[in-house]
Amino acid sequence: MTPAPVRVDHDGGLAVVTIDSPPLNLFDDAVRTALSAAVDELEHRTPRAVLVRAEGAVVSGGVDVRVFERLDGPNEAAALFGELVAISRRVAALPCPTVFAAHGLCLTWAFELALACDLILASEEASFGLIEATVGLTPAMGGTQRLAERAGSGRARELVLTAERFDAATLHDWGVVNRVLPGDGFDAAARDLATRLATGPTRAHAATKQVVEHYLRGGVDAADEHVPALAGELFATADLRGALDSFLREGHGRARFEGR
């Protein structure tokens, strides 16, 4: 039986999503199906953190253009892109930290998936591009708007309109990439960070994501309206109660969180 080109493995509270469709991890029908199934599993299993990574020399070389060749007109294309945008929105809505690890070239759909995650880690050798303009298309998985969210509308226009590739250091300067890490040991370092998030205060992390979402929808005032209730609800969690007790008995930094 051929392994799925996108798989989910669980290591305690950490779910590791691996893209593995050699040689270039191109988006095709098999990847589309497996990616949707992976998101289904993440929603069902509710891990405490998610790490998205890839096998091979590149994260992805982009899309197998035969996917587009088979589309019969605008309506069929719009249906496909609606499905892809929904995947990005579902990943963004996961109630736990999500980390995307880019070790090499990361084009089109893979970059758009990265932008739907909370944190993007990149190796020093990584590069990124939304190159859809080279085939007369615009990014259709939510990448343009999420890039604008992170870097501003001007940078989003530059990256998409030029269809150029940008290195990790440049995108770190723009605020798109959160951290640039050495290539040696990159995969382990990404897993270590994701594991640390998976052993943290899961309910508090979910509340943080909600606060940011309220800010993005309505600014500081909207976030301010929701913070009291979101923070207040955490006093019903075992993690907060246990951490307060640990602080009083053992001091700061010794709490153990269970995600409840």
Image: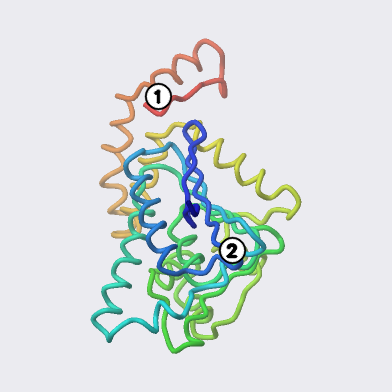
Q: Residue at x 32, y 81 (%)?
A: 71
The reply, left or right, for residue 2 in relation to residue 232 is right
Which numbered marker is on residue 22?
2
| Residue 31 in picture, x, y percent from top left | 44, 62
The quadrant in which residue 54 appears is bottom right
Which numbered marker is on residue 223?
none
Height in image: 175 above or below 66? Answer: above
Question: Furthest residue to the left?
Answer: 75
Quadrant of the frame with the C terminus: top left
Instruction: Name the amino acid, label 1.
Output: Leu
Q: How far apart are labels 2 and 1 at the CA level? A: 44 Å
- Count of numbered circles on the image: 2
The reply, left or right, for residue 151 in relation to residue 216 is right
Q: Residue at x 47, y 62 (%)?
A: 115
Q: Secondary structure at mark 1?
A: helix
Q: Residue at x 52, y 47 (%)?
A: 51
| Residue 210 in picture, x, y percent from top left | 33, 47
- Residue holding disc 1: 240
Indicate which disc, 2 or 1, sits on the residue closer to the N terminus: 2
Local packing at callout 2 (Cα closer than 10 Å; few below 14, some 14-19, many 20+) is few
Q: Secondary structure at mark 2?
A: loop
Height in image: 194 above or below 173? Answer: above
Instruction: Name the amino acid, label 2.
Output: Pro
Question: Furthest residue to the top?
Answer: 249
Local packing at callout 1 (Cα closer than 10 Å; few below 14, some 14-19, many 20+) is many
Q: Nearer the viewer, residue 164 or 137?
A: 137
| Residue 242 in picture, x, y percent from top left | 42, 18
Q: Nearer the viewer, residue 156 or 250?
A: 156
